[in-house]
Every structure is written in C-alpha cells, then in structure tokens.
Amino acid sequence: MIENKEKIIKSLGVIGTVIAILMFVSLLEIAISNLSGLSHIFIQPIVVTINCSIWSAYAFLKKEHFVFWANFPGIILGIFTTLTAFI
C-alpha cells in the first residue's frame, strides 16, 4: 500500500513538472511576438520570473526536486521574454 502511494506521488511529481515546463515554454510565443514588433508584453513574464524565483528558492531550501525543476525554467524563460519586450 505504501509502495503504491509512493509511486503515485512520484508520477504526479513528474507529470506536474512536465506540465509546468510546457507552460513556461509557452512564453516563447510572447517572445516571438515581442521580437516581431507585434506586442511589447512584459508584465506577465516579469510576474512569472518573480513567482518562479520564489518557488525555486523555497524548493531548493526544502530539497523539493520536483517543485524546483518545475519552476527553474520559468526564471530563465521569464527573463528572456521580459528582455524581448524592450528590444
């Protein structure tokens, strides 16, 4: 029973991490739009960067690997997307 519970928890962690990374990769659509001159969206990527930084710091300190790796890409993509709004 406990072994099954651990497998379910690990599976949920992997699925959640993959979905979070896909969500942050969607920032690339905003970056492409910014670079094309179609928009200059910067508030959403700034908020993503702040949110992911806080969650990554929390996860790093708590040694929560799934939470950390689910949020760390959001920091990089958030910064990149924010910068594209000003280019």
Image: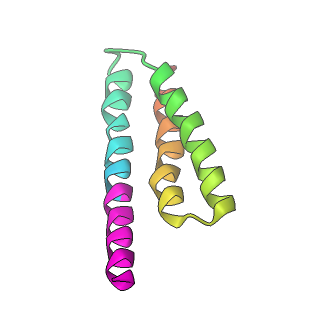
Quadrant position of residue 59 = bottom right
On screen, 85 above or below 60?
above
Quadrant position of residue 16 = bottom left
Which of the pair 58/29 is nearer the observer? 58
Which of the pair 55/23 is nearer the observer? 55
On screen, 51 above or below 42?
below
Residue 29 in the image, given as x and y percentages of width and height: 30, 32
Residue 12 in the image, given as x and y percentages of width and height: 33, 63
Residue at the image point whose x is 49% and y is 36% from the top: 78
Which of the pair 77/13 is nearer the observer? 13
Residue 51 in the image, given as x and y percentages of width and height: 55, 37
Residue at the image point whose x is 33% and y is 83% from the top: 1
On screen, 62 above or below 28?
below
Q: Which residues are magenta?
A: 1-17
44 with respect to 64 (left or right)? left
Which of the pair 15/82 is nearer the observer? 15
72 with respect to 20 (left or right)? right
53 with respect to 67 (left or right)? right
